[in-house]
Amino acid sequence: GRGPNRAKLGHQTTHGMGGQSGPGSSPPEQDRRRTFSGTSGVSPTGAGVRRGATRPRFSSRGVGPATQGDFGEGESGEGPTGGEYFDPWTGTGGALRTYDDLSKPPPGVNLITDHLVPSPFAADYPRPIMLGDGDEMLNQICDRFNGTWRFCPTVNKERLEFFNTTNPHGFYQCDVRQFVAAVSCGYVDIGMLGKDKGAKDKAKMGGKKLKDVKRDRVKYPGLVHTHEATFPVHGVVTDNEARDGAQPKGDNSYGFRHFPALAHHLAVYPDATGHFFNQLPRLFMLLHSLPPSVPIVMNKHGLASQLVEILQRYGLVTAGRFLPLEPKMYSANTVFFAGEMGRLPGTRKWDTLAVERCSWGLAVPRSLPRDMLVGPMGMKEPHKHLEVLVVDRRDATNKARAISNHCDLMIKLREKLPGANVREYVGSKLGFEDQIRAFMRADLLIAPHGAAIGLCGFMRPGGAVLEVAYPLRKWPAVFMPVALGARLSYYLSFGQKGKHSGPIQADTDEVSDLAVKAAKQMGRWGIRPDPYEKPGKAPGLKSGCKAKPSPKADG
């Protein structure tokens, strides 16, 4: 807090950070892909961060059974429901200064973890691997469907202007910095409380005022700000908000919770599975960088609770480390958050909102969750043969993007991949830990477009993702950078027909030929499993698809 509001908080005074710029004061010059800087010498009150502070130790030995997904309550004070904590700009659209370049942090902000990953595409840009002449096939696909997909040879005018360059693929040449920032006297905005969809539709037609119906739900949470400034990162604010300058949306009537120190793992659509997977690397960055005394606010839902239970059981966190998101405004003497900065090729400016346009940027730290879990989960053992994981979305609502000829595809893959272990993955039949284990074991993932591809960060580096897309202009081409960021190759096949809300009919010949191509590229084609190999504790995942019997000869 500031001024007279500090006394009203009734909590410890924050020493602040006084503009001391830690590791983020100048761009790192070397690639620290596997090495993270420690904390700086700045000591925010109550945060337990100091020079030489002990990092959390990650043990390969479990700590025994834990309560299913323990979420804590945290030590905090409850604020009044009035507006004493905030100036009148709260909820009235007042403009705060937006800091989207934290390479030289402003006063009161410090980067306690900061590392650089240079773009691997300095001379060229990546393309999906397809059959035949890759460029010719890609040109045909882009001309037929959508020339503005990021991997297409053409690009829209807006992107060229954004990067201040004539290079249509400059966004693949962004360097990226991944960081954890500490903000003195900070707030975590929880966005807008839930609104009734019907009321929203009526408001559009008749101009009626929106009415609250579910005040226990939040939308667009996670923007960190002070009384003077906001610190947006991609995925917490939308592209449209970023253009106008990210501003808090919270309302003074929500009520408050104040902490000595607090971190958050929040982003847009906190209940959405795909967004949960997209943000997962940031959570592991917080666990890697912060002392265990700093609580982390996270939305509590099925996958999140299972993840918390896994982290507790393998000794990576203690019970109560995570706090369930509540419909209240959060403040702390020191607020921590994770994010990324992309450096635009044209302007050479670092920008926390550029990673979406840098395309592969948000996917850069995707291997960190695997690195932290693969040892404790006992999944390090190598193998030489090919492990194939085929996603079956038959459990999706309306069979959205389920491969309608899934069994034909499974049979074709087994015919063309001798020695390979081809397994079937149905997400709803597995707990989250078995899902992680299945991906850790896989070398090649074959999947229709969907959130399951977001788990490819748990795969072995050097593997491949083969996405089966639906043949429509609206197909979102988002998973290639996710695969690249996990150090995986990306293959693409368009279905013969299909749509986002319905099944996809795969071209089984094309998909199986691409699978053979991927297996040969990895050096795993035709290799039989070694009976003495230890496969780790991956689930069996047997398929019910059986080869069709050969027709009987006449006579």
Image: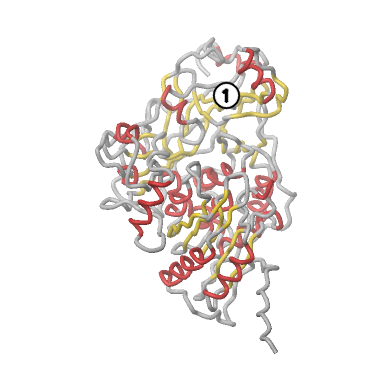
Q: Position of residue 399 (x, y in %)?
A: 67, 50
Pointer 1 residue:
12
Question: Residue 73 appears in which quarter of the rendering?
Answer: top right
Residue drawn at the location 50% of the way across and 16% of the way down: 2
Seen from the viewer's position, the closer of residues 318 and 11 is 318
Q: Position of residue 363 (x, y in %)?
A: 45, 48
Seen from the viewer's position, the closer of residues 538 and 296 is 538
Task: Give the quadrant of the C terminus.
Answer: bottom right
Q: Position of residue 371 (x, y in %)?
A: 51, 57
Seen from the viewer's position, the closer of residues 469 and 214 is 469
User: Would residue 497 be found to the left or right of residue 483 on screen?
Assistant: right
How many C-alpha atoms fall within 10 Å of the one at disc 1: few (<14), some, or many (≥20)? some
Q: Secondary structure at mark 1?
A: loop
- Would you say residue 54 is visible in this rendering? no
In this view, 383 is above or below 222: below
Q: Amino acid at mark 1?
A: Gln
Seen from the viewer's position, the closer of residues 126 and 375 is 126
In this view, 56 is above or below 250: below
Q: Position of residue 210 (x, y in %)?
A: 66, 17
Residue drawn at the location 57% of the way across and 36% of the way down: 266
Residue drawn at the location 36% of the way across and 38% of the way down: 24
Colouring style? secondary structure
User: Would residue 57 be found to the left or right of residue 540 on screen?
Assistant: left
- Would you say residue 419 is visible in this rendering? yes
User: Would residue 207 be found to the left or right of residue 523 on screen?
Assistant: right
